[in-house]
Amino acid sequence: MVGGGMRQAGVVAAAALHALDHHVDRLADDHSRARRLAEGLAALPGVDIAAETVETNILVFAVPDAPSFCAALDRDGVKMIPLDERRVRAVTHLDVDDAAIEQALQAAAGAIRGMTGAAAS
């Protein structure tokens, strides 16, 4: 019944229903971690993000070379997606804890340092 004539829609709807039943209370954790990630990224040279505007678990920011930045993060076990040549999308979720935010920030600092030669910290 859920999803109409599209088979895949039922699977997506089932996941959404499960999330509504079991994970709504912890959404604030995802939002808080996204804000922490945004604040840490904003402190890095070459990263353009208005951390104060991050209100959900999704953030978009700019770096000089998004594909290279994301590739460097991937080598450190951090997954972010380049949206275009400059913009990157990051999402916090159930599998992203406080330690993962710190890992992402360290990896981001290293990636920026590698791209620009700046002393990112």
Image (spheres, grey):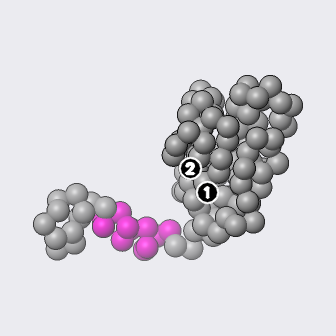
> How many numbered discs?
2
Instruction: Write down the quadrant of residue 77 in the picture.
Output: top right
Q: Is residue 77 visible?
A: no
Q: Quadrant of the N terminus?
A: bottom left
Instruction: Write down the quadrant of residue 29 in the picture.
Output: bottom right
Q: Which residue is labeled 1 in the image?
A: 59
* Disc 1, SS: strand
- Name the mark on residue 77: none
Q: Main secondary structure of the magenta part?
A: helix
Region in magenta: 13-23
* Disc 2, SS: strand
Q: Is residue 1 visible?
A: yes
Q: Residues within 10 Å of mark 2 (few under 14, many from 20)?
A: some
Instruction: Write down the quadrant of residue 16 in the picture.
Output: bottom left
Image side of residue 113 versus residue 31, left or right = right
Q: Are marks 2 and 1 in contact (CB under 8 Å)?
A: yes
User: The residue under label 2 is which amino acid type?
Assistant: Arg
- Name the mark on residue 89: 2
Q: Residue at x 77, y 51 (%)?
A: 42
Is 12 contained in the magenta span? Answer: no
**CA separation in Å, label 2 and label 1:** 6 Å
Q: Residue at x 16, y 70 (%)?
A: 4
Q: Which of the two discs, 2 and 1, labels the residue nearer the N terminus?
A: 1
Image side of residue 31 versus residue 10, left or right = right
Against 55, is 113 above or below? Answer: above
User: The residue under label 1 is which amino acid type?
Assistant: Leu
Q: Quadrant of the C terminus?
A: top right
Q: Residues within 10 Å of mark 1 (few under 14, many from 20)?
A: many
Q: Residue at x 80, y 25 (%)?
A: 117
Image side of residue 53 versus residue 89, left or right = right
Please provide percent x and percent y for residue 5: 13, 66
Please provide percent x and percent y for residue 15: 35, 63
